[in-house]
Image: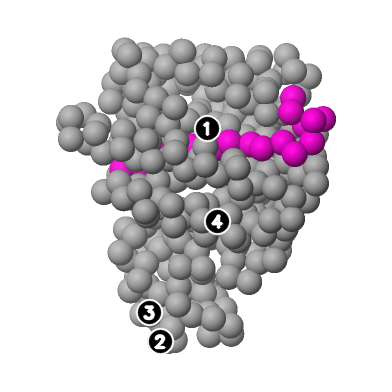
């Protein structure tokens, strides 16, 4: 990996760390999550980068992919378990990080479990490591807290402008084997819960985040305008909050883009009990660079 690219990853990671730590102070009962999202996304831009995706603010049993839409009125409540999943891009090079804030003393064990798992498995990262060693260790640590890892959410590789690529890094021991390669960029992200060990997509056809995957002719002018705007993101996810369009026109435009397979939708992922999440991005070397730490 070229030094210039490493520096861009490190800068993305530096900004992601700043924003992650600052954002913890925003999570309080009575605060609207749309306010938190807008503060975090503005702060990323203020620091010289762009959001790699709309900030995910997933509460309690929602594991991932909840980002407030334009008219979201969700308010953080006392005793909520709040997950912030933050992506920062510098010239398309992405830092991916997540943290969980427990507003109830009873849920702090969930935070401790994923943070401990992440801290320990990062020590295993180097060229040649079989990811199953990492996966097995994540499961072992989370279960030592009498909790369950989420088995159908995984860590992943990252490439320029692309949030999820191979390899995957499962959160439990399984038959997936892959030896890490020098210069790869990976995100490791343990999830833990007291409930069942898997999540499901929301049954309703509702998504809050989208990626442009292909450009096709569209009937609606508004749909064409959205494509034009989103092409600038080169496939990175976007939110309806970032589009200067409201009401029925926006809904119909998004619907046409989905029906014509122009966009990929990120449906909300939900378990049956509170879920915690922690994540860092790492460049694989003998002495790995943990860019978000």
Q: Name the residue under label 3.
A: 225
Q: Mark 2 points at which residue?
A: 221
- Mark 3 Cα shell of 10 Å, populated few (<14), some (14-19), many (≥20): some
Q: Can residue 69 be seen in this view?
A: yes
Q: Position of residue 39 (x, y in %)?
A: 51, 56
Q: Give the range drawn in magenta.
A: 92-109
Q: Do the residues labelled 1 and 3 touch (CB within 8 Å)?
A: no
In the rendered structure, which disc, 4 or 2, sits on the residue that comes first in sequence?
A: 4
Q: Quadrant of the C terminus?
A: top left
| Above or below: residue 72 compared with residue 114 | below
Left or right of 113 in this view: 182: left
Q: Which mark is residue 279?
A: 1
Q: Do the residues labelled 4 and 3 touch (CB within 8 Å)?
A: no
Q: Are marks 3 and 2 in contact (CB under 8 Å)?
A: yes
Q: Where is residue 235 in the image (x, y as percent from the top left)?
A: 36, 57
Q: Nearer the viewer, mark 1 or mark 4?
A: 4
| Above or below: residue 48 compared with residue 130 | below
In the rendered structure, which disc, 1 or 4, sits on the residue that comes first in sequence?
A: 4
Q: Distance between the residues labelled 4 and 2?
A: 28 Å
């Amino acid at each position: 990996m070229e030094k210039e690219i490493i520096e861009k990853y490190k800068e993305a990671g530096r900004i992601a760390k700043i924003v992650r730590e600052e954002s913890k102070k925003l999570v309080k009962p009575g605060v609207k999550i749309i306010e938190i999202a807008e503060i975090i996304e503005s702060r990323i831009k203020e620091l010289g980068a762009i959001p790699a995706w709309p900030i995910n603010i997933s509460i309690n049993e929602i594991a991932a992919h909840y980002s407030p839409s334009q008219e979201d009125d969700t308010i953080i409540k006392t005793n909520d378990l709040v997950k912030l999943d933050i992506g920062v891009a510098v010239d398309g090079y992405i830092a991916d990080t997540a943290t969980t804030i427990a507003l109830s003393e009873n849920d702090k064990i969930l935070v401790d479990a994923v943070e401990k798992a992440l801290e320990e498995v990062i020590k295993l990262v180097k060229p040649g490591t079989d990811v199953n060693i990492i996966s097995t260790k994540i499961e072992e640590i989370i279960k030592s807290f009498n909790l369950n890892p989420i088995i159908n959410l995984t860590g992943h590789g990252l490439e320029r402008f692309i949030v999820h690529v191979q390899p995957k890094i499962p959160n439990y021991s399984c038959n997936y084997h892959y030896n890490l390669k020098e210069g790869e960029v990976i995100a490791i992200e343990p999830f833990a819960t007291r409930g069942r060990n898997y999540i499901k997509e929301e049954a309703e056809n509702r998504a809050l985040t989208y990626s442009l995957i292909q450009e096709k002719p569209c009937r609606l002018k508004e749909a064409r305008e959205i494509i034009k705007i989103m092409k600038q993101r080169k496939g990175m996810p976007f939110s309806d909050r970032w589009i200067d369009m409201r009401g029925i026109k926006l809904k119909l435009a998004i619907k046409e883009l989905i029906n014509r397979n122009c966009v990929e939708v990120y449906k909300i992922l939900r378990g049956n009990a509170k879920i915690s999440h922690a994540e860092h991005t790492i460049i694989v070397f003998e002495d790995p660079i943990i860019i978000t730490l």
